[in-house]
């Protein structure tokens, strides 16, 4: 007679339903996913076999079970799928924090192998709010530090031209820009007494009639900052202005006018020689810096002004 074999249920792989039941009540998002065959060289893809109730709260994705990651998030970053691939091929747990730009969320995840080939478990938490709070805190510290150093540096200076030189140099360093300058607007002219610029760029210090500087005139008429990330894509840049920008190597810029009593009195310009996505934080720093530059120059001019308009 053959002997019956006892199977230890504790060593059997959990079923999809058992996984779902096990993680149903936890606050973390849970997903049991399985790698699906893809053509050689194609991006990896995974199918959701089971998710818990918290899955939608953390991801915003609905009715995920049975669908693939690329069906739900077609533009998901390849590096996220690479995390999963490393667990499938390596058989070891990993943890990661990453920004999923295609979903505009931050995730903290632990990824575990299972007893079933090609299947892995992902436990994750949406940490977007925490990351945003940390980002705001860092920006506030940066703002505080920058303007504290600027204030300390400006305190002993009485010469308006030296003030402009210091402001533009510190601004260029903070923004890691290629050029920075502050213009005084007087009698229809833009007066640049000092500018800061990287090596191989010429100085643009001088007096410029506003009618001959369409970019300045555009900013002043608008009465608000003009932000251009790339002159190739900016509708406001016409053919003539485009040619001038190329000549001056102005590809991306922030121009901030200073308006007092309805009139333009100053203009701060931060310039890059290549396309750049200016952030809201950088724009806000430029706006505050323009006001501070105007205030410092005005204070110095009220006390003493050199006899020549351009030292």
Image: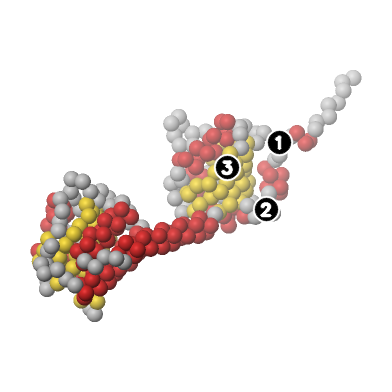
Q: Secondary structure at mark 2?
A: loop
The quadrant the C terminus occupies is bottom left
Residue designated by label 2: 26
- Which x, y percent locates residue 190? 15, 66
Residue designated by label 3: 95
Is the C-beta separation of discs 1 and 2 under 8 Å? no
Numbered mark located on residue 13 in the image: 1
Going from N to C along the chain, the mark reached first, 1 or 3, is 1
Q: Quadrant of residue 240?
A: bottom left
- Which x, y percent locates residue 128? 51, 56
Work out whether residue 62 can be spotted.
no
Q: Is residue 259 above or below residue 173?
A: below
Work out whether residue 85 can be spotted.
yes
Left or right: residue 259 compared with residue 119: left
Is the C-beta separation of discs 3 and 2 under 8 Å? no
- Which x, y percent locates residue 197? 22, 52
Q: Secondary structure at mark 1?
A: loop
Going from N to C along the chain, the mark reached first, 1 or 2, is 1
**Identity of the residue drawn at 50% across and 60% down:** 133
**Identity of the residue drawn at 86% across and 26% down:** 4
Numbered mark located on residue 29 in the image: none
Q: Residues within 10 Å of mark 1 (few under 14, many from 20)?
A: few
Going from N to C along the chain, the mark reached first, 3 or 2, is 2
The quadrant the N terminus occupies is top right
Left or right: residue 83 compared with residue 25: left
Q: Is residue 107 above or below residue 148?
A: above
Q: Nearer the viewer, mark 3 or mark 2?
A: 3
């Amino acid at each position: 007679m053959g002997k019956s074999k006892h199977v230890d249920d504790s060593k059997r792989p959990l079923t999809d339903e058992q996984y779902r039941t096990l993680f149903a009540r936890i606050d973390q998002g849970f997903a049991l996913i399985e790698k699906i065959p893809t053509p050689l060289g194609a991006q990896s893809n995974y199918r959701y076999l089971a998710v818990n109730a918290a899955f939608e709260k953390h991801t915003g994705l609905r009715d995920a079970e049975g669908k693939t990651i690329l069906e739900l998030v077609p533009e998901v970053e390849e590096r996220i799928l690479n995390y999963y691939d490393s667990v499938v091929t390596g058989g070891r747990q990993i943890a990661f924090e990453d920004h999923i730009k295609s979903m505009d969320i931050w995730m903290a995840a632990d990824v575990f192998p299972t007893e079933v080939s090609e299947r892995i478990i992902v436990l994750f938490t949406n940490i977007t709010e925490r990351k945003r709070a940390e980002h705001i805190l860092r920006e506030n510290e940066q703002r505080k530090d920058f303007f504290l150093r600027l204030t300390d540096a400006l305190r002993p200076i009485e010469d308006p031209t030296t003030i402009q030189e210091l402001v533009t140099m510190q601004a260029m360093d903070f923004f890691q820009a290629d050029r920075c300058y502050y213009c005084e607007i007087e009698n229809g002219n833009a007066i640049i007494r000092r500018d800061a610029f990287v090596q191989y760029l010429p100085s643009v210090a001088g007096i410029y009639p506003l009618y001959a500087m369409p970019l300045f005139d555009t900013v002043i008429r608008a009465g608000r900052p003009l932000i251009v990330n790339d002159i190739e894509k900016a509708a406001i840049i016409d053919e003539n202005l485009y040619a001038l920008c190329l000549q001056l190597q102005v590809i991306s810029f922030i121009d901030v006018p200073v308006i007092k009593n309805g009139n333009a009195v100053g203009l701060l310009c931060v310039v890059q020689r290549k396309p750049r996505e200016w952030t809201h934080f950088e724009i806000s720093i430029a706006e505050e810096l323009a006001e501070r530059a105007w205030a410092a120059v005005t204070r110095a001019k009220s006390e003493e002004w050199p006899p020549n308009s351009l030292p």
